[in-house]
Amino acid sequence: MRGFVPHSDFPLYHMPLLPIMIGLGLKILPGMYYLRLIYVLVNCLSVVPLYITLKKIQNNTGAVLLAILFYLTFYEMVRHDFRFLAIRQLANVFFICFFYLGIVQKHWKYTPILQTLLSVFSVLLFLPTSFNLLFVSLAIIFSEEDSKVRNGLLKRYVYIGLTTLAVLACYFIIVPNSFNQTILEQVGRDSISRIYRLKIFIYSQFYERDKFFYGLSFFSLMVTIVLNKKLRYFALAMIGIMLISLWLPSTFYFHYLSAAGPAFAFGIFAFGTLIFGLRKRVGVPGLIIIYSTYILLFLVQLSIVSNSLMDEWLGNKKNEDYFETISVLSQTSEPLITFMPIFAVEAKKELLIELAPAYMRSLIRRRFTDHEYDIFASRACTIFLDRHARAELPTEVIERWSAKYTVIYKSRWGKILKTNNQNCEN
C-alpha cells in the first residue's frame, strides 16, 4: 500500500499475492474485519465445488458428505480464522477450483484459461502448492480412459505448466532477491527441524485433534490404491500432496500441513466409498454395521474437534482486550514500532520501515545493535512492545525503552509507549 517492493525493500519468504490482495481490500473496505469475514465465507463456500467434484468422481453422497464434514472441522484449517488471513487456506480454495474445472468442466472451452489463471495465482500465493496442482493434473490425465481425450488433457496441462513457469521466471527476473528468499533460503534450511516437526506431530497432545483425520485418511488412500482402480490415480496424487506438505521447509510451521486439507478430505471420501461399496455384498446385518460405522465416524470427529472449535470461536468473540489495544493504538501518533505488524494494519498506522527485517522475521538478516535500536526508537512516535518483541529485541533494549518512554496502555498483548520525538503529534 505504501509502494514498497517485496523481497527488495523488505524480506518476504512467501510469494506476494496475498499481501497484494489484502492491500487492495483495505483500499476498498473499511478495515480488516470485513476482509476476514469475506475470507471465512470464501473458505466455507469452497466446499460447494469440492462436493460437486467428489460427487462427479464417485456418485456416493454419503462418502462426499463425510469428506466435507471432516474438511470443515479440520482444526488446523479453521484455527485463528478471525485473527489473520492464512495463505494455506486460500491456496486450498484455488486448488479446489482447479480440481473442479478439471473434473466437472473438463470440456468447457474456458476451462484451460481459468485453470491457467488459477495455477499462476497459486504459485504467486504459496509456491509449494505448485506440486499439489502437478499431482492432481497427472491424476486427471491418467484416470481418463479415452486415449484421445487423455492426449488432449496432456497437452492442456503441459501448456498450463509452461505458462505458470514462464510467469514465475518473469517474477524472479524482475523482482530482486525474490528467487533467493522464496527458494534458495528455503532449500538451504536444515532438514533436522523438519524431522523434529514430524516428531511433534506424532507425540504432541496439542495435535491430537487432527491425528484421527490424518491417520484415517492416509490409511484409506493406501487401501484405495490396491482395491479401487477408478480412484487409484487420485489416491496416489493425494498421498503425494500429503508428503509434500509434511516435508515443507522448516520455515513453515506445523499448521501448514493444512495446505493438504483437500487431499486429507479426499482420503475420507475414499474411505466412505470403500465402506459404502460393500452394501451390495452384505445382508441387513451388514448394512446396519455400515451405517453405524458412518454415523460413528461423524460422532467421533465432532467429539474430537467440537470443544477446540468452540473455544476458538468464543476466544475470537470475547477478545475484548485485543480490540481495546487496537483502539488505543489507532489514537497514537505514527510511525509505529511493533513486531506484530497486524496491529499496525488494524490501527491504520505507518510502520517504521527501517525495522522491516525484524517485522517480517527474515530468515537471513543481520542483527541490529542496541545503539541502532535506540536510533530507530527516536524516529518513531509510538512503540508497542508486543509478545514478539521479546524474541526480536535484546532484554536491555526493552528495559531501557520501558524506563525512558511513557507507558500509556498495558494489556496481555503488550504495552504501548509514547516516545519523546518532537516531530510527533500530541
Image (cartoon, rainbow, N blue to C red):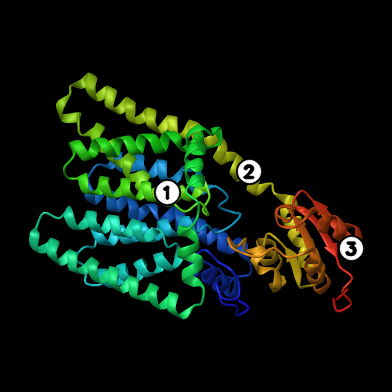
| Residue positioned 23% across, 51% down in the render | 56
- Mark-to-mark CA distance, 1 and 2: 33 Å
Relative image position of residue 126 (x, y in whole percent): 45, 62
- Is 330 drawn above or below residue 258 in the view shown? below
Choose mark 1 or mark 2, whichever is in front.
1
Q: Secondary structure at mark 1?
A: loop
Q: Are marks 2 and 3 in contact (CB under 8 Å)?
A: no
- The residue that disc 2 covers is 314
Which SS class for mark 2? helix
Q: Is residue 382 above or below residue 59?
A: below
Seen from the viewer's position, the closer of residues 290 and 237 is 237
Residue 8 is drawn in which quadrant? bottom right
**Who's the residue at 42% across and 49% down the image?**
247
Q: Quadrant of residue 32?
A: bottom right
Q: Give the left or right position of residue 361, taking residue 75 as reference.
A: right
Q: Which is closer to the viewer, label 3 or label 1?
A: 1
Q: Is residue 401 left or right of residue 133?
A: right
Q: Is residue 382 visible?
A: yes
Q: Position of residue 212 (x, y in %)?
A: 42, 33
Measured from the top left, where is residue 424 in percent x and y? 85, 76
**Residue type of the residue flagged with mark 3:** Tyr
Q: Which mark is residue 405?
A: 3
